């Protein structure tokens, strides 16, 4: 039997073979430490890292010195939020976010609250969207930062980041955006978005796992940030630790290969095809998230009266999920589905399908038939 059809691209993506090809020499040939300036191995590694920094920056409309390499988006979120919280005073400062953020943002907000900051977690509507006016109303004299993700990792809703960016600028408040799910199908433009900090991850954009980046604005305003990982002062003191040179080279190649408009359009076609097939085969199936503001590869459905766990067991050779990988591990009902108003029962009858670069129309047809069969056995 071949490998299962992979349709869980919000959890992680296959590393593009072109990315792997670029990375390979940095394991066994150009393996110097990028901080070793005394010899050609080190200088070669450093040159590769700096070229990569330029490519990552260019892909989001930033300047190279504004990029800090991290181990992924979780670390980038931690560096952005704790880094700003520590740099901008101690007690009483106010931070705003919204209910469907990734756990790596929400957990930090809970910790900030325990440490004496004021936090506001705004609700979303049934489509998973936060209201920019609600953000405006929540701002106070002491608000330091707003954090809103670009695209949700479960239901694919695309937040109105440009509108939020404009209102934050007007109020003189920093805006952090977890853009992990947006980069491959929507693209990121830090200027047009009006964002000051942006988190990205390699493995969600057909790059390697264990590498990511944080964009930190240098001008208008210059964002101050205290490091979370101390040591030898790498990354201009913002993130110590020997740089993951192959990973960084891979992240940059993944960024260079992105073509969000074309990729988004192709995925939108595949996703609509899958939705039409499922809708025809499964009367009563409902689609979650926003109709017009969504990740083009996302299809999140609820099938009343079914158990998604049982469907997944029967679906051995199609890899889709009952929720986010992080939520699946904890077996709690997803906070995202709760936030958009699904009951615990509905959440247990829901499936997340994430189409990506390597999926084909044939796979969509096969997967649709298998999902329908598995659901009808319920
Ligand atoms: C996957 C994901 C993360 C975590 O990224 P890692 O690089 O795995 O740490 C953060 N936010 C969102 C929206 C994600 O989808």
Image (tube, rainbow, N blue to C red):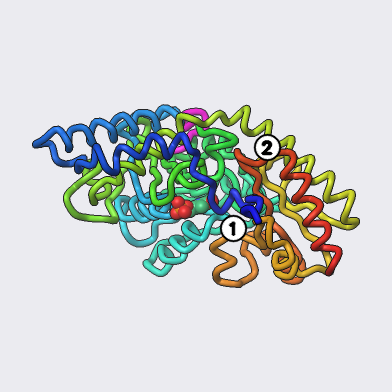
Q: Mark 2 highlights which residue?
A: 267
Range covered by the magenta-colored residues: 189-196
Residue 345 placement, left or right of 159: right
Residue depth check, mark 2 versus mark 1: number of the one nearer the observer: 2
Q: Is residue 110 left or right of residue 226?
A: right
Magenta stretch contains residue 194: yes
Q: Is residue 310 visible?
A: yes
Which mark is on residue 350? none
Residue at position x 58%, y 31% in the image: 260
Q: Residue at x 61, y 72 (%)?
A: 332
Near-viewer residue (85 or 320): 320
Q: Position of residue 58 (x, y in %)?
A: 41, 27
| Front-most of residues 137 and 316 | 316
Q: Please tell me in which quadrant of the rendered image residue 47 appears.
A: top left
Q: Secondary structure at mark 1?
A: loop
**Residue 224 coordinates in the image, percent (x, y):** 30, 44
Q: Which residue is depicted at the point 61% across and 28% down?
A: 261
């Amino acid at each position: 039997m071949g490998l299962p059809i992979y349709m869980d691209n919000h959890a992680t993506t296959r590393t593009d073979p072109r990315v792997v090809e670029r990375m390979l020499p940095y394991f066994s040939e150009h393996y110097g430490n990028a901080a070793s300036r005394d010899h050609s191995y080190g200088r070669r590694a450093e040159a590769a890292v700096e070229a990569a920094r330029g490519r990552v920056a260019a892909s989001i409309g930033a300047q190279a010195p504004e990029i800090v390499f991290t181990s992924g988006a979780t670390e980038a979120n931690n560096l952005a939020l704790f880094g700003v919280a520590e740099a901008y005073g101690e007690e009483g400062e106010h931070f705003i976010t919204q209910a469907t953020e990734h756990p790596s943002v929400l957990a930090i907000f809970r910790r900030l609250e325990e440490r004496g900051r004021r936090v506001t977690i705004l609700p979303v509507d049934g489509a998973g969207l936060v209201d920019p006016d609600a953000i405006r109303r929540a701002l106070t004299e002491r608000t330091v930062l707003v954090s809103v993700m670009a695209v949700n990792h479960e239901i694919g809703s695309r937040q109105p980041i440009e509108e939020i960016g404009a209102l934050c600028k007007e109020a003189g408040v920093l805006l952090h955006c977890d853009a992990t799910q947006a980069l491959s199908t929507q693209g990121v433009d830090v200027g047009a978005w009006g964002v000051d900090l942006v988190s990205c991850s390699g493995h969600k954009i057909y790059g390697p796992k264990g590498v990511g980046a944080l964009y930190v604005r240098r001008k208008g305003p210059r964002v101050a940030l205290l490091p979370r990982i101390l040591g030898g002062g790498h990354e201009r003191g913002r993130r110590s630790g020997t740089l993951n040179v192959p990973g960084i080279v891979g992240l940059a190649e993944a960024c260079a290969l992105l073509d969000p408009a074309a990729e988004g359009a192709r995925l939108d076609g595949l996703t609509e095809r899958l939705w039409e097939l499922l809708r025809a085969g499964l009367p009563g199936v409902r689609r979650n998230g926003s109709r017009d503001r969504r990740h083009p590869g996302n299809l999140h459905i609820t099938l009343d009266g079914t158990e998604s766990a049982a469907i997944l067991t029967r679906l051995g050779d199609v890899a889709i999920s009952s929720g986010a990988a992080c939520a699946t591990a904890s077996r709690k009902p997803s906070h995202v589905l709760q936030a958009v108003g699904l009951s615990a029962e509905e959440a247990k009858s829901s499936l997340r399908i994430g189409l990506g670069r390597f999926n084909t129309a044939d796979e969509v047809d096969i997967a649709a038939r298998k999902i329908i069969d598995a659901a009808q056995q319920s």
